[in-house]
Amino acid sequence: MLKEFKEFALRGNLIDTAVAFVMAVAFGKIVTAFVDGMVMPLVGLLTSGKDFSTMTYELKAGTTDIIDLSGNVTTQAVPAVAIKYGTFITVCIDFLIVAFVMFMVVKAVNKMKKAQPAPAPAGPTNEEVLLTEIRDALRK
């Protein structure tokens, strides 16, 4: 069982997949930093200085702690219930950039692959050769 596991773990495709996964995670962090630090400020500038990370739609307002005269908290604070659509927009932009880069990588890899020539047409089989000889003999 240990030998089978070793063969499985050291198989080329599995290692390639693991490396690709690690690279994808690192690339995702780079894209997120790029979008958060460079793209979204520009988008915010185009949209009159809005910060997308703070854009929310509040469904229910939150409450603060209620404290009695002796300083004890009688009612705990309740956070607001809100839809964070600005964060969703930012993540969608992240996805579009990653999808575009992956499209370009796949396109480049496909272009680098050599076009496989069409296989040469197979010659006649032995039976076909024999039948052709019989036909030619009968014609004579």
Image (cartoon, grey):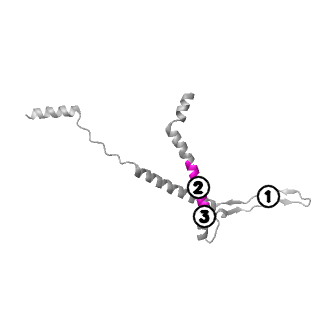
Residue 109 in the image, given as x and y percentages of width and height: 44, 50
Residue at image position (55%, 32%) is 6
Residue at image position (82%, 59%) is 65
Query: Is 24 left, or right, of 53 in this rendering?
Result: left
Q: CA distance from mark 1 to mark 3?
A: 32 Å
Checking the image for residue 40, the label placed there is 3
Instruction: Please provide the residue range marked out in magenta.
Output: 23-36
Q: Say which element carries label 3.
A: helix
Q: CA distance from mark 2 to mark 1?
A: 37 Å
Q: Label 2, on which residue? A: 30
Residue at image position (58%, 55%) is 30
Do the CB atoms of the residues marked 2 and 1 lie less than 8 Å apart? no
Residue 90 in the image, given as x and y percentages of width and height: 60, 60
Q: For mark 2, does the 10 Å Cα neighbourhood hold few (<14), some (14 to 19), or many (20 or more) residues?
A: few
Q: Label 1, on which residue? A: 77
Do the CB atoms of the residues marked 3 and 2 lie less than 8 Å apart? no
